Image (cartoon, rainbow, N blue to C red):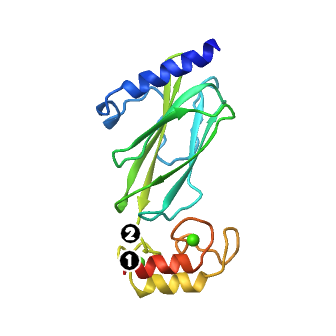
């Protein structure tokens, strides 16, 4: 009960921080630019991971992030998505967090996404990842939506995540199926 009250107090503090505090984050922990888990030399230090099950992401469709912390400890998280939005919450006790975010504009160079953990003892750790987001309907990431994208979707229609014929780029709405809805997205954005 006492710990829950402390967690809420920390969350309130995080929420009270001005947005500018996140614009240029300074971290005490390792910053990992590849998005793979970082393993500090000191084994008592936590490691953070950020994994994207979909390599190709598009404007208007949910970008899926899988976060994890080792070891799992009571903490508050904040995620800076790189487009001016930040999300806060209490980290699940099992150390695994799935988050979805929709981007409203394309960024082929990629948005810098920060996943930051605030522990109750005041320490903070973060990992970073660059996430390119393509135009809605752009299946091959060439910056235009045209008949080539429609062709790619048609070639993979009926495939599901895990199938040999599944193509991450052709699954434009990240629902793990390539179907008529993905073709509709291409046609709507040509
Ligand atoms: Ca294209
Ligand atoms: Ca789909």
| Disc 2 Cβ-to-ligand 1 distance below 8 Å | yes
- Picture residue at 31% right of the left edge, 29% below the top: 18
Q: Residue furthest top?
A: 2
In the picture, the quarter occupied by the N terminus is top right
Q: Residue furthest left?
A: 20
In the rendered image, the vertical position of residue 27 relative to residue 129, given as above or below: above
Q: Nearer the viewer, residue 92 or 32?
A: 92
Counting labels gives: 2
Count neighbours of disc 1 (C-alpha within 10 A) and say few if under 14, some if 14 to 19, many if 20 or more. Answer: few
Measured as percent of width and height from the top left, residue 122 is found at 49, 18
On the rendering, which quadrant does ligand 1 occupy?
A: bottom left
Measured as percent of width and height from the top left, residue 10 is found at 49, 20
Q: Which residue corresponds to mark 1?
A: 189
Q: Which residue corresponds to mark 2?
A: 135
Count neighbours of disc 2 (C-alpha within 10 A) and say few if under 14, some if 14 to 19, many if 20 or more. Answer: many
Measured as percent of width and height from the top left, residue 26 is found at 37, 30
Residue 93 is left or right of residue 9, and the answer is right
């Amino acid at each position: 009960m006492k710990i829950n009250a402390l967690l809420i107090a920390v969350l309130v503090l995080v929420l009270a921080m001005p947005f500018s505090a996140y614009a240029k984050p300074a971290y005490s922990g390792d910053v990992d630019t590849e998005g793979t888990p970082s393993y500090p030399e000191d084994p008592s230090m936590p490691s953070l991971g950020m994994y994207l099950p979909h390599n190709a992401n598009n404007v208007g469709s949910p970008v899926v992030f899988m976060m994890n912390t080792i070891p799992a400890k009571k903490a508050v998280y904040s995620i800076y998505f790189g487009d001016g939005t930040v999300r806060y919450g209490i980290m699940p006790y099992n150390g695994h967090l799935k988050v979805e975010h929709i981007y409203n504009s394309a960024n082929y160079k990629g948005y810098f996404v920060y996943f930051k953990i605030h522990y109750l003892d005041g320490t903070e750790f973060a990992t970073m990842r660059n996430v390119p987001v393509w135009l809605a309907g752009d299946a091959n990431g060439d910056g235009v939506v045209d008949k080539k994208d429609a062709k790619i979707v048609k070639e993979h229609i009926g495939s599901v995540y895990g199938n040999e014929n599944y193509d991450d780029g052709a699954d434009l709405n990240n629902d793990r199926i390539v179907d008529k809805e993905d073709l509709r997205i291409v046609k709507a954005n040509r």
